[in-house]
Amino acid sequence: MQQKGVHWFPGHMQKAMRQIKEKVDLIDVVVEVVDARCPISSKNKYLEDLTNNKPRVIVFSKKDLSSLQELKPFISYYKNKGYYCVICNLNNSGDINLIKKAICEKGKVITEKYIRRRMKPQPIRAMIIGIPNVGKSTLINRLTKSSSTSVANTPGHTKSQQWIKVDNLLELLDTPGILPPVYDNKISAIHLALIGSMKIENIPEFLLAEYLATILIRDYPNNLKERFDLEETDLIYPSSVFLGIARKRGLLIKQGEYDINKAELLLLKEFKEGLIVRLVLDKYVEL
């Protein structure tokens, strides 16, 4: 597969990058949310460059869709870069408490400065950053125990920055999801499309489905077989997988003619929803 760059940078993202640059000096801690299925591809290196002089927490969201065993090398990688790592399910209150603890731990140098000067400590100011659809707004709503920010399962939903008070110890700055202007590695762009962080129309669906089917045939054939009740003879090529899915699920264009396109879409949908296998796609991306 050719490794040509994929360009994606709507106007509101460019504006958001400028706003982050303007506000970064007001921030005590940067919290970046990445998808645990794509711990490299879902991290924006341009945001890292803008905030690399700040204490940093990295939140691996959607651990329930990922493989914790496959995630271990990535956790070590980020710890070695100075990140405080938290692996979480954003619907789990215990995990949310761990994230708040991590932010306070990274921001305690600011709190201690106020105490040394015998001043009343000010709330730690944390900026929440990340690419679209990794769970930033969900994280903020869980931290504030409210619906401070709207949530949608579509890339690019949040369009502007906003300050949100959690309590007397913590304030958050929500930011829009921002993808890099270009992905030099096309595989990373494909991974983001597969998990729903890049609009799927940017990459043809048949290409996504073929790529996914190839991975599943090679590394997770039993999961694929069990989910769709496939035969061994279906697990040879992507095309045979799609035909097998269409046959088993009764996806027809007309009597006797199977709808391969619907089978491709069904594979993509059920993978995104975590119904086929828990994995780390980025184990195929070089660290």
Image (tube, grey):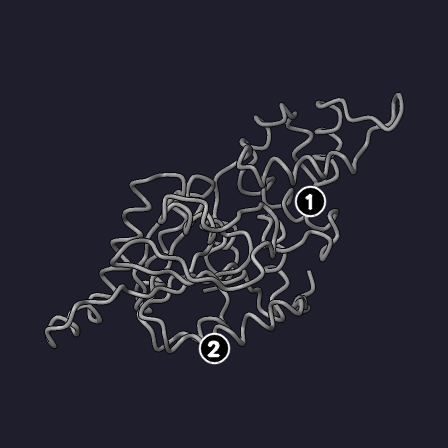
Give left or right: position of 247 versus 282.
Answer: right
Percent across and percent down for residue 146 are 41, 44
Residue 209 badge: 1
Label 1: how many residues lie within 10 Å, few (<14), some (14-19) or many (20+)? many
Give me the disc on residue 77: none
In the depicted structure, whether residue 71 falls above or below residue 184: above
Q: Identify the residue position indicated by label 2 in the image.
A: 21
Q: Nearer the viewer, residue 228 or 204?
A: 204
Q: Give the residue drawn at x 28%, y 49%.
A: 98
Number of marks in picture: 2
Image location of residue 9, percent across then percent down: 65, 68
Q: Nearer the viewer, residue 262 or 158?
A: 158
Q: Foreground mark, 2 or 1?
A: 2
Alpha carbon of mark 2 to alpha carbon of mark 1: how far?
A: 37 Å
Left or right for 7, reference 221: right
Which amino acid type corresponds to the residue marked 1 in the rendered image? Ala
Instruction: Kindly give the residue lying farthest to the front in the view shown.
Output: 120
Vertical placement of residue 23 versus 168, above or below: below
Q: Amino acid at mark 2?
A: Lys
Q: Callout 2: helix, strand or loop?
A: helix
- Image quadrant holding the N terminus, namely bottom right
Residue at image point 52% right, 55% down:
284
Asked where in the image residue 64 lies, by quadrant, the reply is top left
**SS of the residue under disc 1:** helix
Q: Position of residue 287 (x, y in %)?
A: 45, 64
